Amino acid sequence: MSTQPAPPRRIGVFGGAFDPPHHGHTALAQAALQYLDLDLLLVVPTGTAWHKSRPLSDAQHRLAMCVLAFGDTPQTRVDGCEIARSGPSYTVDTLRDLRLAYPDAGFFLLMGQDQAQHLGSWSRAEDLPQLAT
């Protein structure tokens, strides 16, 4: 009998600039955990944001702000994978990497209305439905 905890089966992926993270972000995270019955919520600050017209705060500062903002939210982990990756950050690449790391999980992509309105312009947007709900 294994004493290892079961790997997460339902994983939410909440990406964004988080510059800065605010109450709307944390409220969405809490609602997603509750209503989507997530085992884990990954908060993923963008590395190099290809779609932002304004300069962002330093990536390490945004990562630290996310740790402060989401650190008390149960079942939530801030993941710096996009910050560690060189070049522009594309959600499709992040989801592909996460599927390799968690092969038995189902993924749920979370975003604010501001990003949902522009989803069709994202890099390889047509691949997203095969990678996450």
Image: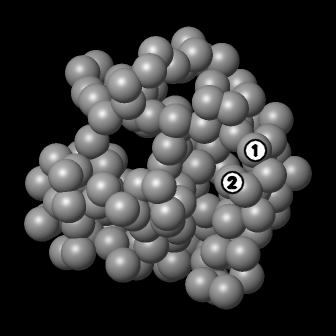
Please, which residue is most extreme toward the right here?
72
Check the image and tell me how it is coloured.
one colour
Q: What x and y, as percent, mark residue 68?
A: 82, 35
Point 68% across, 65% down: residue: 28
Disc 1 marks which amino acid?
A: His
Nearer-the-camera pick, 112 or 59? 112
Q: Residue 101 appears in which quarter of the rendering?
A: bottom left
Q: Are marks 1 and 2 in contact (CB under 8 Å)?
A: yes
Nearer-the-camera pick, 35 or 99? 35
Identify the residue under disc 1. Answer: 22
Point 66% across, 18% down: residue: 61
Point 36% across, 78% down: residue: 133
Crowd around label 1: few <14 · some 14–19 · many ≥20 (10 Å): few
- Asked whether, in this view, residue 79 is left or right of residue 72, the answer is left
Crowd around label 2: few <14 · some 14–19 · many ≥20 (10 Å): some
Image height of 91 relative to 109, above or below: above
Q: CA distance from mark 1 to mark 2?
A: 5 Å
Point 49% across, 63% down: residue: 113
Q: How many marks?
A: 2
Q: Residue 71 appears in which quarter of the rendering?
A: top right
Secondary structure under the numbered disc 2 in the rendered image = helix
Quadrant holding the N terminus: bottom right
